Image (cartoon, helix red, strand yellow):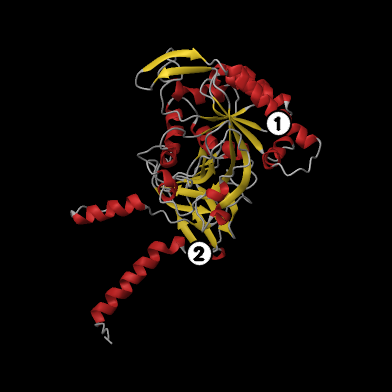
């Protein structure tokens, strides 16, 4: 057996390195139950901000969110005080309609668990397929996205989504809200031929009316099942029941004016009150209708081409401002190919909307409080207010700007989140290999 003998010099070096390590990770230690973040600019999430804030966290919740310039602070009351002057504090950003955690490598079919066979699948739950150990997830939360609505895909009714915390041992531990709603892919009235680089003509769908009738018949059956309090073990109808008592939301994926109109009217006919339109690429053309029917939206990713060739080329960027001016509640989502890993760009979608007229704090609200309301979790997260869960992050710069987003601390329910990820590991590895400074 070998004996390790440490010289005095080695002991001093070891002690110094240990102290430096402790000082570096101190903010992340879980035993510090009462923490004060002092001096950062707090973006509350409800359209307001505090230039110099004092935010205290205790037992997993926000104990105090105040203006540090007008209160007196007793340093002895806190286990740890973290000075974050010239930093920004945000509620955790919320990703919606994503396959994060249920897909890993799009080209490897075995890692894709977001689509089941069939047309009507309300009973399919993304919750139990969620992989808390996904290597994509740490890359997303490094940009401040701390919660995600994980949704299945495919079919006319894709299934039931759940809202997940982007940190946890397993899907049970990570669940923020179980079975929050059912996702409906509304039939398309028009179909564009060609592909995105060479779009062809737009043609009317021949089966639109029959597909809409099929949907209405299915919902009529589900409503009858609910109204009659039927006890037959029909797993599809059981999954649909909570749409009619308001416990679940109906997320309708639709982009065109005709589709959105028909979808909203059918939901009203079926007495479904909690609906959200997902995509809504032409919603800016029908603001009066949306306002009249109190419809909320998750906007398709705005880093895309316009919906039609005669639209302004920057319409996707301006759409959020138009909807805000019209008083429509909306949030952002990041749909499309590679959408799981693309969630890291969600904050920058909001930043693009700011560059095209949307007020900054309203862009933050769209990523936080507005989205939390539409998901039914605003009583716990979405704003930096006393009593809410301590799910927030601190960035050195503007988190909506890709050059400024630099998250240094992140907490979910008061628990410090590891901000390292595979990409950062590789960055350090190859910089070290070629003797470059670590950034």
Question: Would you identify the image quadrant in which residue 369 lies?
Answer: top right
Q: Name the residue under label 2.
A: 30
Q: Where is residue 321 in the image (x, y as percent from the top left)?
A: 51, 24
| 1 vs 2, front mark | 1
Q: How far apart are marks 1 and 2 (CA)?
A: 42 Å
Question: Would you identify the image quadrant in which residue 336 lies?
Answer: top left
Quarter that holds the N terminus: bottom left
Q: Which residue is drawn at 46% across and 30% down?
A: 301
Instruction: State whether residue 223 is above or below residue 193.
Output: below
Q: Earlier in the sequence, mark 1 or mark 2?
A: 2
Seen from the viewer's position, the closer of residues 247 and 430 is 247
Q: Where is residue 101 in the image (x, y as percent from the top left)?
A: 48, 47
Q: Position of residue 215 (x, y in %)?
A: 65, 26
Q: Which residue is drawn at 68% across and 23% down?
A: 266
Residue lying at the far left in this picture: please name it. 434
Which disc, if any, is residue 273? 1
Q: What element carries label 2?
A: loop
Seen from the viewer's position, the closer of residues 157 and 335 is 157
Q: Is mark 1 on a helix, strand or loop?
A: loop
Q: Residue at x 51, y 26 (%)?
A: 320
> In this orientation, does residue 320 appear?
yes
Q: Residue at x 28, y 77 (%)?
A: 12
Instruction: State whether residue 235 is above or below residue 310.
Output: below
Which disc, if any, is residue 67? none
Q: Position of residue 82 (x, y in %)?
A: 46, 57
Residue lying at the far right in this picture: please name it. 228
């Amino acid at each position: 057996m070998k004996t390790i003998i440490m010289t005095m010099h080695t002991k001093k070096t070891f002690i110094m390195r240990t102290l430096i390590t402790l000082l570096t990770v101190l903010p992340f230690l879980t035993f510090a139950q009462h923490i004060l973040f002092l001096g950062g600019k707090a973006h509350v999430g409800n359209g307001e901000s505090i230039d110099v804030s004092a935010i205290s966290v205790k037992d997993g919740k926000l104990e105090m969110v105040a203006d540090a310039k007008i209160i007196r602070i007793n340093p002895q009351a806190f286990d740890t005080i973290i000075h974050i002057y010239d930093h920004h504090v945000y509620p955790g950003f919320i990703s919606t309609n994503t396959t994060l955690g249920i897909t890993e490598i799009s080209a490897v079919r075995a890692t894709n668990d977001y689509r089941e066979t069939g047309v009507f699948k309300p009973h399919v739950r993304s919750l139990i397929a969620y992989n808390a150990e996904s290597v994509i997830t740490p890359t997303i939360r490094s940009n401040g996205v701390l919660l995600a609505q994980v949704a299945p895909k495919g079919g006319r009714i894709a299934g039931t989504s759940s809202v997940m915390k982007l940190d946890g041992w397993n899907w049970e531990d990570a669940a923020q809200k179980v079975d929050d709603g059912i996702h409906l892919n509304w039939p398309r009235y028009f179909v564009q031929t060609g592909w995105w680089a060479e779009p062809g003509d737009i043609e009317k769908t021949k089966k639109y009316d029959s597909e809409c009738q099929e949907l209405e018949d299915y919902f009529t059956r589900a409503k009858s099942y609910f109204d009659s309090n039927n006890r037959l073990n029909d797993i599809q109808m059981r999954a649909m029941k909570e749409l009619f008592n308001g416990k679940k939301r109906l997320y309708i994926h639709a982009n065109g004016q005709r589709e959105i109109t028909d979808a909203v009217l059918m939901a009203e006919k079926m007495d479904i009150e909690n609906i959200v339109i997902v995509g809504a690429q032409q919603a800016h053309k029908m603001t009066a209708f949306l306002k009249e029917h109190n419809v909320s939206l998750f906007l398709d990713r705005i880093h895309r081409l316009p919906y039609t060739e005669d639209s302004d080329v920057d319409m996707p960027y301006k759409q959020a401002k138009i909807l805000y001016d019209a008083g429509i509640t909306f949030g952002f989502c990041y749909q499309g190919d590679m959408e799981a890993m693309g969630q890291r760009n969600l904050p920058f979608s909001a930043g693009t909307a700011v560059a095209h007229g949307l007020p900054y704090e309203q862009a933050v609200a769209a990523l936080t409080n507005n989205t939390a309301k539409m998901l039914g979790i605003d009583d716990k997260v979405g704003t930096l207010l006393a009593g809410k869960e301590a799910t927030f992050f601190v960035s050195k710069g503007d988190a909506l700007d890709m050059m400024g987003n630099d998250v240094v601390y992140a907490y979910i329910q008061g628990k410090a989140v590891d901000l390292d990820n595979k990409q950062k590991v590789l960055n350090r590895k190859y910089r070290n290999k070629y003797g470059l400074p670590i950034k």
